[in-house]
Image (cartoon, rainbow, N blue to C red):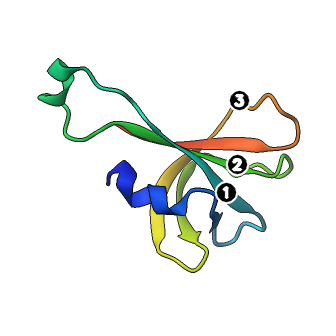
Amino acid sequence: MTPEHFLPYLNKMFRVPGWPHALTLETVDIRRTEEWEKQKLPRQPFTLIFSGPPQQVLREGFHPLQVEDGPSFDLYVIPIHTVPRDRQNYQAAFN
């Protein structure tokens, strides 16, 4: 997968089967790579940042995330430290 797979879904809702809340794709963070790294890396590293409600945190692990009116992606999602109290952020990293 590449960042381009996810860019059309920025600010879209993602549903996790069996979990009552939705996640919103907030950012597709594309890491800048040095020229020497490009020869060694199998793909462009990037991270997806999702945001969800602050209560009932989604557990770390593989989850099928279904884009509202779109495709489904099986992603390893990790809750991350979130300073604002009005949401909980999550990341899915692609190295």
Q: Residue at x 29, y 39 (%)?
A: 44
Within 10 Å of disc 3 (Cα), the crowding (few <14, some 14-19, many 20+) is few
Whichever of callouts 2 and 3 sits on the residue coming sooner in the sequence is 2
Q: Residue at x 33, y 51 (%)?
A: 2
Read off the residue under disc 2: 51
Task: Point out the frontmost of discs 2 and 3.
Answer: 2
Q: Amino acid at mark 3?
A: His
Q: Position of residue 23 (x, y in %)?
A: 68, 58
Read off the residue under disc 1: 24
Residue 36 horizontal side relative to residue 46, left or right: left
Q: How many marks?
A: 3
Mark 1 lies on a secondary structure that is: strand
Q: Amino acid at mark 1?
A: Thr
Residue 55 horizontal side relative to residue 58, left or right: right
Q: Residue furthest bottom?
A: 69
Mark 3 lies on a secondary structure that is: loop
